[in-house]
Amino acid sequence: MNGHNPPFKSALAYSVQNEDYETELEVIRRMDRAAPLRVLLVASSGENALSVLTQDRVGEVWAVDLNPAQIHLCELRAAAVSALSRDDQLRFLGSDPDRVGAAGAEDRLALFDRVSGGLPEASRLFWSARRDAEIAFGVQHVGRNDVLMHDIQDHLRAAGFDPLGRPVIDAELGAWTDVYAALMTPAYIRDMFGLPSEALAARIAGISRILGECHFRALQQPRPERNPFVTTVFANAYASAAGEAGLPLYLQMQGQAALRRLGSARGCGWWRATFSSRCGSWPARLARSI
């Protein structure tokens, strides 16, 4: 078992973002509409929602998700921005792969005590019930998709690959994608993500080789160790080799400064986002506007 896998199954599907926030930022830059903009996007891990919120043209962010746990993760990240320094936020989330689990648990629990008072009631209850599980272990590593990435690492290494350690060549693509197909069976996918439908699990399993080739081609790009979307898959960490650019925008110092400027300008915190699991209730403001 991968040492970064938690000894429990989390309600979180995603702890870190798979999609590049630059896509959303480019759309915002190209929109021929007067500011302030209202942005609607999937909540997921919250990294992109909070990164979009740093933009001057954005007046509101509505982050929605069918999985309430993802909404609570957004709230947790948001409360951490308010309560902690940037470096403490990284420690709290478990960003250092060498301090996953017991190694960093005491520090994360102490930081949670500083963050929890800023959470809305529902999220405070959600995370307090998971204080000794997700919080102590390191939230960044517990999402079910993140556990899948850990398992992929293990199976690739068992097959003789060393992602980020040894360059891959085109002749290895078939053997590489064989690893993904062998791991991501319908039974594995259904169990990993708790899916009610065998048909849905089979459809997801059917993209295993596509996912494998996407990862393979990403590793063939120049300096993959500087790409956080590659390093979170294969090194369980943001891209430290890229410095600030290896972090989600909201965790970069410029992003933190932008969020804090919102707070000083409004006098009541930097909150300009709405997190909601009630996708069907749009556009009614049923969620807490933080």
Image (cartoon, rainbow, N blue to C red):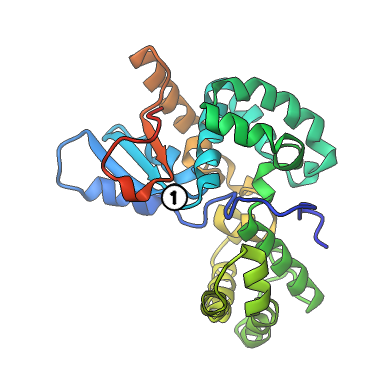
Q: Residue at x 76, y 55 (%)?
A: 5
Q: Quadrant of the N terminus?
A: bottom right
Tell me where residue 85 sits by quadrant. top right
Q: Residue at x 29, y 45 (%)?
A: 282
Instruction: Identify the residue at the far front of this view.
Output: 196
Vertical comparison of 270 with 275: above or below: above
Report whether 116 appears left or right of 269: right
Q: Quadrant of the C terminus?
A: top left
Q: Which residue is mark 1?
A: 65
Which amino acid does the dot numbered 1 rest on? Asp
Q: Closest to the observer: 209 or 200?
A: 200
Tell me where residue 96 sits by quadrant. top right
Q: Residue at x 63, y 54 (%)?
A: 232
Q: Is residue 132 visible?
A: yes
Q: How many marks?
A: 1
The percent coordinates of residue 200 (x first, y second) are: 52, 75
Q: Closest to the observer: 247 or 63?
A: 63
The percent coordinates of residue 9 (x first, y second) are: 71, 54
Tell me where residue 134 sits by quadrant. top right
The percent coordinates of residue 271 (x first, y second) are: 40, 26
Report whether 283 appears left or right of 254: left
Report whether 276 appears left or right of 140: left
Vertical comparison of 242 with 130: above or below: below
Q: Is residue 227 visible?
A: no
- SS of the residue under disc 1: loop
Q: Crowding at label 1, few (<14), some or many (≥20) Cα neighbours within 10 Å?
A: some
